Amino acid sequence: MYILLDIGFIIFHTVLILFNLFGWIWKATRRWNLATLLFTAFSWFILGIWYGFGYCPCTDWHWQVRRELGYTEMPTSYIEFLVELLTGLDFSTALVDTATAILFFMALLISIYVNFRDFEKKPIAE
């Protein structure tokens, strides 16, 4: 069961990250993209007050599953884990965290912009 949960978390969390980065591209998903980006920011910065800056419930739950599978040395960052899993390379935590923050804030700013632009273009009902 834990193996299926591990695979499920890898798929779900990776899709969520990709959606956060690129969900603003399609008009139909822009509002959902902004919502997931804001939820991510809430998790990192508000829940992070209590659980540590950058806290993510998905990562927390996934690491619990991986501990049950016998993994003992997990990085603090899911992105660091994912990059190593996909490439086999071990980048520095600082580099991964910096790239993550830059890409996150770029996606957030773009999402805010396109959502605001779409809202302004909406015809006013008479």
Image (cartoon, rainbow, N blue to C red):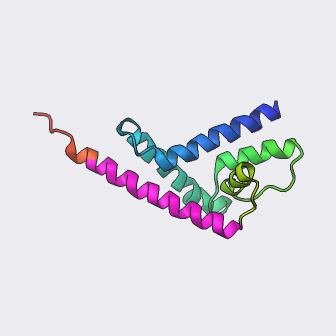
Q: Residue at x 39, y 51 (%)?
A: 111
Image location of residue 13, percent across then percent down: 63, 43
Question: Which residue sits furthest bottom?
Answer: 94
Query: Taken as a whole, is the magenta stretch helix, strand or loop?
Result: helix
Image location of residue 72, percent across then percent down: 87, 53
User: Is 16 or 95 nearer to us in this picture?
Assistant: 95
In the displayed structure, would residue 46 be above or below residue 59? below
In the displayed structure, would residue 69 be above or below residue 1? below
Where, by quadrant of the figure, is residue 88 drawn?
bottom right
Q: Residue at x 64, y 56 (%)?
A: 55
In the displayed structure, would residue 99 be above or below residue 61? below
Q: Is residue 41 left or right of residue 121?
A: right
* Quarter containing the C terminus: top left
Image location of residue 115, percent across then percent down: 33, 47
In the displayed structure, would residue 25 be above or below residue 91? above
Question: Which residue sits furthest left?
Answer: 126
* Quarter containing the N terminus: top right
**Number of marks in picture:** 0
Q: Residue at x 20, y 44 (%)?
A: 121
Q: Is residue 94 magenta?
A: yes
Q: Is residue 123 left or right of residue 25?
A: left
Q: Is residue 103 magenta?
A: yes
User: Is 58 or 105 nearer to us in this picture?
Assistant: 105
Q: Is residue 87 left or right of residue 39?
A: right
Where, by quadrant of the figure, is residue 15 drawn?
top right
- Looking at the rendering, the stretch of residues picked out in magenta corresponds to 92-117
Image location of residue 91, percent across then percent down: 71, 64
